Image (spheres, helix red, strand yellow):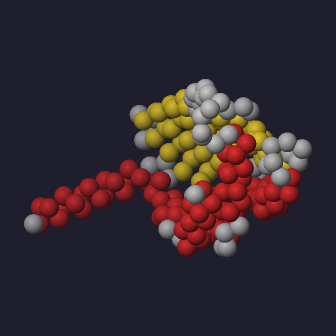
Amino acid sequence: MFAVAVTIAVLCALIAALLAVPVMLVIDAECVEALKARWRIRWLFGPVDIRLPRERPSPPERSESSESPTPDRNSRRKARIALAVLRTRGLIHRVMRASSDVLRHVTLEEFRLQTAFGFDNPADTGVVYGVLAPWFVLAERRGLNVECRPMFLESGLRGALRATIHLRPLAVVGTLLAFLLSRPVRRAVRSAWRVRK
């Protein structure tokens, strides 16, 4: 029994030590017609170097007789889900708090974001932009290079992101778990699920 307890203690200490080693994450993403993203993760001071070229495959062509929702219906449904999530009571405050907690443990070596978005309904675009505006203020205060503009005359999302991030996993795991298990996030998931049905 003592040997089992020692083994468990050693394994826990080893996991904690590994999670305390900094991770470097490089993200290079672009969204015009489709999302194209490249990720690079370096850990343990170099021996672990993972590159993930990820591209969303183009959707297969479907016949017009298909009963699946049209792209317009899909975009409207996504817009309704996004609005339902953003209107969840307490979610924005919880996200801002979790972001602030995570950013305390994250070193941003480089961060550039240029984006533009719009929904079918210009009023929805204005509402979402108004909700996101505090994020832009927070980003500017932290010296991040963020440019975002609403598109009132067309719908869609386009932009580019380049970021190099250093973090210690052990420092952010607890914050992320607390955020994911918080009441506003659970409410947001329920709201999105109801709208999706």
Give percent across and percent down for residue 138.
76, 60
Give percent across and percent down for residue 171.
49, 60
The answer to whether residue 8 is visible is yes
Give percent across and percent down for residue 169.
47, 53
Compared with residue 190, is residue 117 higher up or lower down, i.e. above or below? Answer: above
Q: What residue is rendered at 50% in x and 53% in y?
A: 168
Locate residue 135 relative to residue 185 in the image: left or right: right
| Residue toward you, 153 or 159 | 153
Locate residue 10 relative to residue 111 in the image: left or right: left
Locate residue 13 relative to residue 145 in the image: left or right: left
Q: What residue is rendered at 49% in x and 48% in y?
A: 22
Residue extending furthest right?
153
The answer to whether residue 109 is visible is no
- Quadrant in which residue 109 is drawn: top right
- Quadrant in which residue 125 is drawn: bottom right
- State the count of labels: 0
| Residue toward you, 36 or 103 | 36
| Residue toward you, 132 or 174 | 132
Quarter of the image where the C terminus is located: bottom right
Compared with residue 183, is residue 16 higher up or lower down, i.e. above or below? Answer: above
Q: What residue is rendered at 66% in x and 62% in y?
A: 85
Q: What residue is rendered at 86% in x and 45% in y?
A: 151
Give percent across and percent down for residue 14.
31, 53
